[in-house]
Image (cartoon, rainbow, N blue to C red):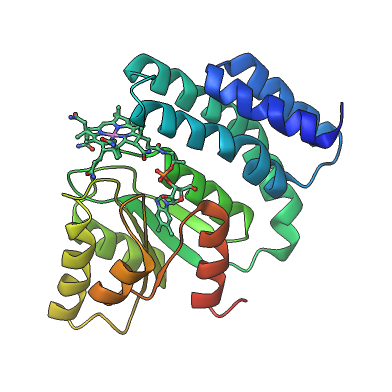
Amino acid sequence: MTKNEIYTKMSEAIVAGDRQAARALAEEAVRSGFDLLEVVEQGYMPGIQRVGALWEEGEYFLPELITSAEAMKSAMAVLNPELNRREGVNRAGARVIIGTVEGDIHDIGKNLVASMLQAGGFEVTDLGVDVKLERFIEAADAAGAGLICLSALLTTTMTNQRRFLELLKERGLRGKYKVLVGGAPASRKWAEEIGADGFAENAVAAVKAAKALAGLA
Ligand code: B12
């Protein structure tokens, strides 16, 4: 099988919600010494994006979404430790806090960003979903993190990204933390409008943006 054929199979495994295939292909990629960031970007990510599109077209419903998300998780469970091991030498030690904002329980994209940040050498604290805005500040303070990443997938919850920046200002903490925002409804324009430090449209771009903000690029 060529690399591209394997990438296509990875994407198909996610779309089909086939946990075993997703995992086996990830193991094969590790064994064959593939560039694992490329594997995520060109193999698995197109699959989960396709799942999102199928949902929007009304082809997929909740059970399909969940099995696809599970397949994605089982592939990442193989890839993450290996990504960490390989990138470990270059670990910059920059600390990052990430979470999905209050009122929002979407975490597939946020988890991908967290995994890729970890693979990119960051020490990541993932606060999970539906995270109270105060909690981001407490966690950043406790971990000594300089970068806070906020995910939001709903137009109703992306406003919490704006509220978070207001909260930092109210507390006199705006200069202390860099804030990176993302999620399907967010955009560069939105990030500028709310005064965030950066935006990235996917997990690979998020690592680049985070590195630039942490002064590591
Ligand atoms: C999966 C899904 C769900 C799952 C979530 C499962 C889970 N564990 O995450 C379930 C079924 C639970 C769900 C629930 C709901 N959902 Co929903 N969901 C989706 C769906 C189909 C896919 C999202 C996804 O995972 N995409 C794949 C990932 C990889 O992409 P991503 O999340 O965009 O993340 C990438 C980038 O955005 C970026 N990124 C993400 N976060 C961050 C953070 C940072 C800092 C950075 C830099 C980058 C970044 O990088 C990621 C990787 O490349 C979308 C449709 C869509 N096409 O987006 C709707 C969608 C987001 N949901 C929607 C809605 C309305 C809901 C519900 C309100 C439905 C309901 N009526 O109950 C509830 C809300 C519950 C809540 N309070 O949060 C709407 C939102 C509409 C809107 N404009 O607000 C959408 C757009 C569907 C639609 N067209 O109607 N949903």
Is 125 placed above or below 24 here? below
Residue 147, horizontal then vertical, whole percent: 41, 69
Residue 215, quarter of picture? bottom right
Which residue is pictured at 66% across the width and 17% down the height?
Answer: 21
The N terminus: image quadrant:
top right
Q: Nearer the viewer, residue 93 or 190?
A: 190
Which residue of the protein is positioned furthest toward the left in this rendering? 170
Residue 166, horizontal then vertical, whole percent: 16, 73
Residue 79, horizontal then vertical, whole percent: 66, 37
Q: Nearer the viewer, residue 213 or 49?
A: 49
Is 28 placed above or below 182 here? above
Residue 170, horizontal then vertical, whole percent: 12, 78
Which residue is pictured at 72% across the width and 56% down the height?
Answer: 87
Is residue 94 in view from this perspective? no
Is 42 placed above or below 193 here? above
Circle count = 0
Is 153 placed above or below 209 here? above
Which residue is pictured at 34% across the width and 65% down the height?
Answer: 140
| 145 lies left or right of 16 | left
Which residue of the protein is positioned furthest toward the front in this rendering? 57
Q: In which quadrant of this rendering is ligand 1 seen?
A: top left
Which residue is pictured at 39% across the width and 59% down the height?
Answer: 97
Residue 74, quarter of picture? top right
Residue 130, quarter of picture? top left
The C terminus: image quadrant:
bottom right
Is residue 82 in view from this perspective? yes
Q: Nearer the viewer, residue 149 or 146?
A: 149
